[in-house]
Amino acid sequence: MSGKRISLTLKVWRQESAKDAGKMATYEVKDINDEMSFLEMLDVLNEQLVTKGERPITFDHDCREGICGACGFVINGHAHSKEKEITVCQLHMRKFQDGETLVLEPWRAKAFPVLQDLMVDRSAFDRIQAAGGYTSVHTGSAVDANSILIPKVDADAAFDAATCIGCGACVASCKNASAMLFVGAKVSQFALLPQGQVERERRVKAMVERMDAEGFGNCTNEYECEAACPKGISVTNIARMNREFLKAAVTDQG
Amino acid sequence: MSKILDSKVPDGPLADKWDLHKAGLKLVAPNNRRKYNILVVGTGLAGASAAASLAEMNYNVTALCISDSPRRAHSIAAQGGINAAKNYPNDNDSVFRLFYDTIKGGDFRAREANVYRLAQVSSSIIDQCVAQGVPFAREYGGVLANRTFGGAQVSRTFYARGQTGQQLLLGAYSAMMRQVARGKVDLRARREMMDLVVVDGIARGVIARNLVTGELERYAADAVLLCTGGYGNVFYLSTNAMACNVTAAYRAHKRGAFMANPCFTQIHPTCIPVSGDYQSKLTLMSESLRNDGRVWVPKKVGDKRPAKDIPENERDYYLERKYPSFGNMVPRDVASRNAKMACDEGRGVGSSGLAVYLDFEDAIKRDGQPAIEARYGNLFHMYEKITGENPYKAPMRIYPAVHYTMGGLWVDYNLESTVPGLFVLGEANFSDHGANRLGASALMQGLADGYFVVPYTIPAHLVGRSYRKVSTADDEFRQAETQVKERIDRLLAVGGSRTVDSFHRELGLIMWDNCGMARNRKGLEEALEKIPALRKAFWADVKVLGAGANINTELEKAGRVADFLEFGELMCRDALVREESCGGHFREESQTEEGEAKRDDEKYCYVAAWEHAGDGKAPVMHKEDLVFENVKLTQRSYK
């Protein structure tokens, strides 16, 4: 436990509302205990701003342990910071040097309009999920759980895809603002499991169509999404989604 | 009194109660269900599973979600697993055993019939989740894997690595999103319930605030389901997510719903400790670590030497010393209380002095680092990420933290509160965990309530009562909205000098010191003086900037803290009246000679259900006596 004190310069995107143009504003934060988390550092700054009568910086956050996917913004050009496999709430101040300047910006994507400051609207992800990210099984109609045998490797691979937290870092890190890692992960989870087979083709088509309609860009194989993903979800899920989509298009009866 | 608190538990043998009850419940025909509007407030495990199930049946559902997406609900953070009496491992598990372990784990302060039903439907939950594509852990043969959890001698816990809550929530969320696509669920994200609307004594809707535009919105329905989680954040620091709050439940309480056993809170012994004044929340570490880790503090008060410099004979392995047979594996409440005592004595470690060591040195010497890595690698990694320290080299520092609240709104066997038409599901109700919840039971209860209980019981209200048609233009809605608006305006008008968080932190400290792991009359009485004073200071000196008509996160927090400032008082009152120790509620006056929790079944074998009597008036306590026909009440011992 070091408890070192550091001071930083923050350049933060400030935007009153979706309609406002927005601009960068500069803040000095002094004597920050480096055991704090990054969001706690922002809490401190916000309390200082409120005390001075200035509007605090708005950002989404909730669980503060890297699982809910609510938080996320860009620090010095990196979604959730340059650290690997973490969300911004898991970032700690000990990763920074005294005197550093940090630039904080919201996720930038046409499909993620800014609501205020670092808070964006990611409801496009919910609409993609609603398009097909499920199995159509009514409550009460399930068979006994062990009547569906699933090879451990398939279950593990499905789990790896299912760990997506829907934070949007994949979109934010992609120069095309593509959502293919997000969609690919969900498509893969079901494609790998027997429960997902019945609706396999319908699902991938509906989800990809919804993704395109929401204004997300295309994938040009830069792999930035995988690098930024706090859960380390692999781009092989995008390849699987593309195969699934092609297959569905070829076998389309309708 | 008993007339008010009719639990509606049917007569008959325990194992047949739910079936008998269901057989007597009314039905709504499929073609008639579309005539009913159901409002679901909260879309975590309980809310999403209820919304999905009711919409599948063809009811019209409107669901309010406080986050930007239902997938953020704090159900997502549950790590360990979900219990079910499947008996897949063939280790002689049964519905009765799961029932017994749960009711005993709750220190005999829950209703037998509710707990038995929970155990009965547990198997169907696993079936449902698997059908949804929840990727549970599996054996090489393709069958589901199980592990063992505290308070049980069988392996009945199903899990998805350390992310069981996430996977179950995503299952319920996707089931609900399917109904959104069908047009049967109208999902409203970033909405916070501000008040309950009661018409002719029946819950008929809510006033909600649109957290993006700041507008107040009126929602009318034939029934309201509160699925709004627990109130652990009354302590400021807890393992709960930042948005977890008591407002929806407390507003319903003020509109007539009784609050049951509010003092029953669970404090989890193994969390990463507070590092500074600005700590915003606490993170849980699985208690499985205590299998190999040894808990200790220095013998000497104020010994600030690094752990490695403190020789063996100057260390106090206090759990091993006080509980030779259970050692470091004593139950959660005992481990938590003893850690607090060590720190209160001034023997806590770390810069704050509020931590104890969990040391793996002996285990690493005995089994080798690779073996420890295989067992706990991900937890060690998580610890290192947060603290920046390597627990293979230096002992972990841990401290107890508020984790779950067993208390909540009183509900009958149908999960209906004392306000007709208001149903309460999941952690928000009080029903199944008594005074202490067993691990892997919270997920089970949330999904049981949403998938398999409320869809059966809601017709009892919908067609079992007569109530008039309402519209959001009615006086009751208009008045409720006006009151909400006045309260918001009051918060914005104070224009004081202190931040909302500063009040919340102060309340949290009062609650933690006086109504936390150990409680006594003096401390509780002190809290009952301090909290009203703090509340007064809040309304006189809080500083909330901006206006109501926009995103205003400070205003959101202010409303929640204002409710915590009233609710905290109710908790202390409840803790003061219950002069016994049970589960997570430890009254220092009621302990055995060895300093262990001592229940008083003669006097306190009841549910305390509090009725709001009006602002500034003392709430009225009603008792629901707990009757145990199928289990023998025993005193727990860990020596």
Image: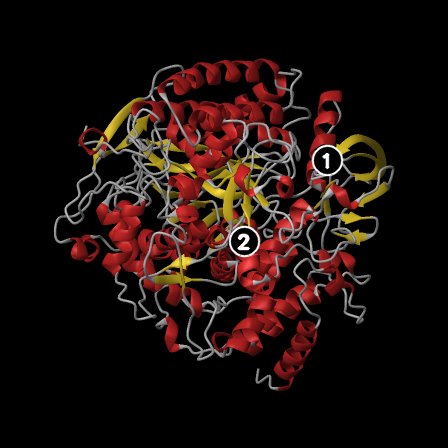
Q: Position of residue B167 (x, y in %)?
A: 51, 60
Front one among B411 and B569: B569
Disc marking residue A3: 1
Residue drawn where x is 37% and y is 70% of the image: A142
Picture quadrant where residue B618 is located: top left
Q: Classify A223 as above or below B72.
A: below
In-image side of A249 versus B11 (left or right): right
Q: Amino acid at mark 1?
A: Gly
Quarter of the picture holding the C terminus of chain B: top left
The reply to whether residue B367 is in sight is yes
Disc marking residue A29: none
Label 1 is found on which chain of the structure? A
Q: Secondary structure at mark 2?
A: helix
Q: Position of residue B354 (x, y in %)?
A: 56, 33
Q: Amino acid at mark 2?
A: Asp
Query: Is the residue at mark 2 from the same chain as the one at mark 1?
Result: no
Label 2 is found on which chain of the structure? B
Residue drawn where x is 41% and y is 41% of the image: B321
Q: Secondary structure at mark 1?
A: loop
Q: CA distance from mark 2 to mark 1?
A: 28 Å
Between disc 2 and disc 1, the foreground one is 2
Q: How many marks?
A: 2
In-image side of B546 versus B186 (left or right): right
Residue drawn where x is 44% and y is 49% of the image: B47
The residue pinned by badge 2 equals B362
Label 1 Cα crowd, 10 Å radius (few <14 / some 14-19 / many 20+): some
Q: Position of residue A119 (x, y in %)?
A: 70, 44
Q: Classify B567 as above or below A136.
A: above
